[in-house]
Image (cartoon, grey):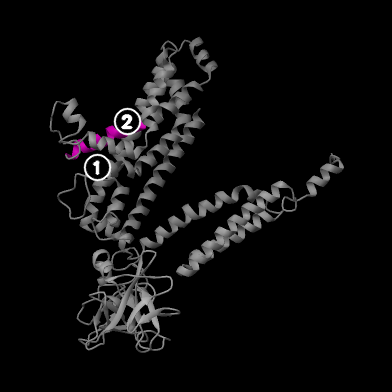
């Protein structure tokens, strides 16, 4: 049966014709100001990424900025106006991070392979510089600007400062090569003033910056093969040039002192015919080598299995103990016969209000074997290694996590119990069900329906609870039968941190750490997917 469209009055038709992008009211002005600020930040980011040579980030940021302008100034993208911020953050902080981690896991990124091949060539030429025998001494002045040190030198010829004439003053730093400076003055061969720079006195150099000045290397030009100038006394500099020679066409590095030729290999290193390599390489793809190392190299595979078992046990026991204690307290404080319930509930939330990392640090001190509060006060001066014995350390980790986590479970269980339908409970009583029967067949299933997703998320959180482990035990006590710095209370995420070398206890190996991160991601994702599937089955039963 045909229907007639509702008749709209004139004002309503005008409102529908008016686009959000063409409504020049106060709201449009606010939107215009916000978009102007966003575009200004975006342009700043584009310039920063362009100057640093990060072209992937540049194009990604440009696409996000153009998309933002289209979405918020177009009348055809109304739904996107609400979901675009979430999509942008999802792309930047989730998809990009996971994608980049996957990429790094297939490379040899780490110590000795931190950059590109061009950066490796530059580093090798700079690290192998030697003083040029017989080179002239260049009188210099040490200058400072905003905490950055540099050399000022009076050019004697064009070889020391490109584009300068004899008598010109040139200034350079460790980052910027020597370049001519206008309006600088000198007295004979000594520079006396440089616009924008402070000329340091000899006393300032000796008392405040001696180590920095003697280690300072100022390149002569943008070409690293042109060498640099350095000083040992802060007054005279000498020319330095690399003992290596880079042949870009052949792709080889030659040691001019020995004649040894190093060719690039597929491992990201310059290698000679006798197998010796130079100490700086570059990042290359290594396929699944990092994954194979994680599961087959005895240095990592043994600790990996033990840490994986402990991680699963830690996450499961943490959720189980905190849930059971929180549920017990919620049932107790949900009883109307208990007086002062509001006060007790408030006290229960106190541990939840303290930042987790701070509480872990406090517990670390309280559990100290020699002077901790637990041993010295509660146990009368006992010397129990709560954090130094492997099993006691694991027990301490679970205990501290129980103290930190039960208030959260107490809150969600209290809310779930108070939301149970009273008519169902009354119907069960009428049918003659006892308290245990009511609890087993009605209360607990309904409670699990509302709390199961939170238990799964709590399991995933504890699976990656790096803060507690790092602040309480730092993974210790250490394994005594492995060569890598891993311990009995390490979980997978703290193992990733140690393997990455960021804590300074091992060489940096970001490729292997990324591979382990992907393994952790797969494990947590699989367990969460199975858990949510089981939760849906529970809802279907109800």
Reply above or below: 82 against 177: above
Reply above or below: 285 against 421: below
Q: CA distance from mark 1 to mark 2?
A: 16 Å
**Pointer 1 residue:** 473
Reply above or below: 376 against 437: below
Q: Please, what is the dominant secondary structure of the magenta stretch?
A: helix
In the rendered structure, find residue 403 and report the number of the disc placed on it.
Answer: 2
- Relative placement, left or right, of 416 versus 76 is left
Which residues fall within the magenta stretch?
Answer: 389-405
As drawn, the residue found furthest toward the front would be 187
110 and 127: which is toward the camera = 127
Residue 148, horizontal then vertical, whole percent: 36, 67
Query: Magenta segment: does it hold 398?
Result: yes
Query: Magenta segment: does it hold 528?
Result: no
In the rendered structure, find residue 524 and report the number of the disc placed on it.
Answer: none
Q: Quadrant of the N terminus?
A: top right
Label 1 element class: loop
Label 2 element class: helix
Reply above or below: 443 against 258: above
80 and 538: which is toward the camera = 80
Residue 137, horizontal then vertical, whole percent: 26, 84
> In this figure, what is the number of numbered marks?
2
What residue lies at 31% left-to-right and 78% top-to-bottom?
140
Q: Is residue 178 visible?
A: no
494 and 130: which is toward the camera = 130
What residue lies at 57% left-to-right and 62% top-to-bottom?
63
Q: Earlier in the sequence, mark 1 or mark 2?
A: 2
Residue 535, horizontal then vertical, whole percent: 46, 35
Q: Residues within 10 Å of mark 2 (few under 14, many from 20)?
A: some
What residue lies at 40% left-to-right and 31% top-to-bottom?
408
């Amino acid at each position: 049966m045909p229907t007639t469209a509702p008749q709209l009055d004139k004002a309503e038709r005008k409102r529908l014709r008016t686009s959000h992008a063409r409504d020049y009211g106060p709201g449009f002005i606010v939107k215009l100001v916000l978009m102007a600020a966003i575009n200004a930040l975006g342009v700043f980011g584009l310039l920063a990424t362009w100057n640093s040579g990060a072209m992937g980030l540049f194009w990604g940021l440009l696409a996000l900025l153009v998309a933002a302008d289209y979405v918020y100034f177009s009348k055809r993208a109304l739904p996107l106006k609400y979901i675009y911020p979430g999509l942008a953050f999802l792309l930047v902080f989730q998809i990009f991070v996971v994608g980049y981690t996957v990429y790094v896991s297939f490379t040899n990124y780490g110590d000795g392979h931190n950059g590109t091949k061009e950066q490796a060539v530059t580093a090798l030429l700079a690290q192998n510089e030697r003083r040029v025998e017989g080179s002239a001494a260049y009188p210099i002045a040490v200058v400072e600007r905003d905490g950055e040190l540099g050399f000022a030198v009076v050019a004697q010829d064009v070889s020391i400062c490109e584009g300068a004439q004899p008598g010109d003053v040139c200034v350079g730093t460790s980052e910027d090569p020597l370049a001519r400076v206008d309006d600088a003055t000198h007295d004979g061969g000594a520079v006396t003033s440089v616009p924008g720079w402070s000329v340091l006195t000899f006393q300032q150099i000796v008392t405040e910056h001696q180590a920095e000045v003697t280690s300072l290397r100022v390149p002569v030009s943008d070409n690293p093969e042109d060498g640099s100038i350095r000083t040992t006394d802060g007054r005279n500099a000498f020319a330095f040039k690399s003992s290596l020679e880079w042949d870009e066409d052949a792709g080889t590095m030659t040691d001019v002192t020995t004649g040894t030729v190093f060719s690039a290999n597929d491992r990201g290193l310059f290698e000679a015919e006798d197998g010796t390599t130079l100490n700086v390489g570059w990042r290359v793809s290594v396929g699944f080598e990092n994954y194979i190392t994680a599961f087959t190299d005895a240095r990592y595979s043994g600790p990996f299995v033990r840490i994986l078992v402990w991680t699963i046990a830690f996450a499961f026991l943490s959720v189980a103990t905190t849930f059971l204690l929180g549920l017990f307290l919620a049932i107790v404080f949900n009883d109307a016969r208990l007086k002062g319930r509001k006060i007790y509930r408030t006290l229960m939330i106190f541990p939840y209000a303290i930042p987790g990392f701070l509480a872990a640090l406090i517990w670390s001190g309280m559990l100290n074997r020699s002077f901790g509060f637990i041993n010295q006060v509660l146990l009368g001066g006992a010397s129990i290694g709560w954090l130094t014995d492997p099993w006691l350390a694991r027990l301490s980790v679970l205990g501290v996590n129980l103290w930190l986590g039960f208030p959260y479970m107490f809150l969600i269980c209290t809310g779930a119990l108070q939301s149970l339908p009273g008519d169902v409970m009354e119907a069960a009583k009428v049918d003659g069900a006892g308290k245990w029967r009511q609890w087993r067949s009605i209360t607990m299933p309904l409670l699990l329906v509302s709390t199961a997703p939170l238990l799964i998320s709590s399991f995933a959180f504890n699976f990656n609870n790096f803060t507690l482990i790092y602040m309480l035990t730092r993974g210790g006590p250490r394994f005594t039968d492995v060569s890598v710095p891993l311990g009995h209370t390490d979980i997978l995420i703290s193992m990733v941190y140690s393997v990455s070398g960021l804590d300074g206890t091992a060489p940096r190996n970001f490729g292997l750490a990324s591979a382990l991160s992907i393994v952790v991601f797969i494990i947590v994702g699989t367990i969460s997917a199975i858990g949510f599937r089981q939760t849906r089955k529970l809802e279907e039963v109800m």
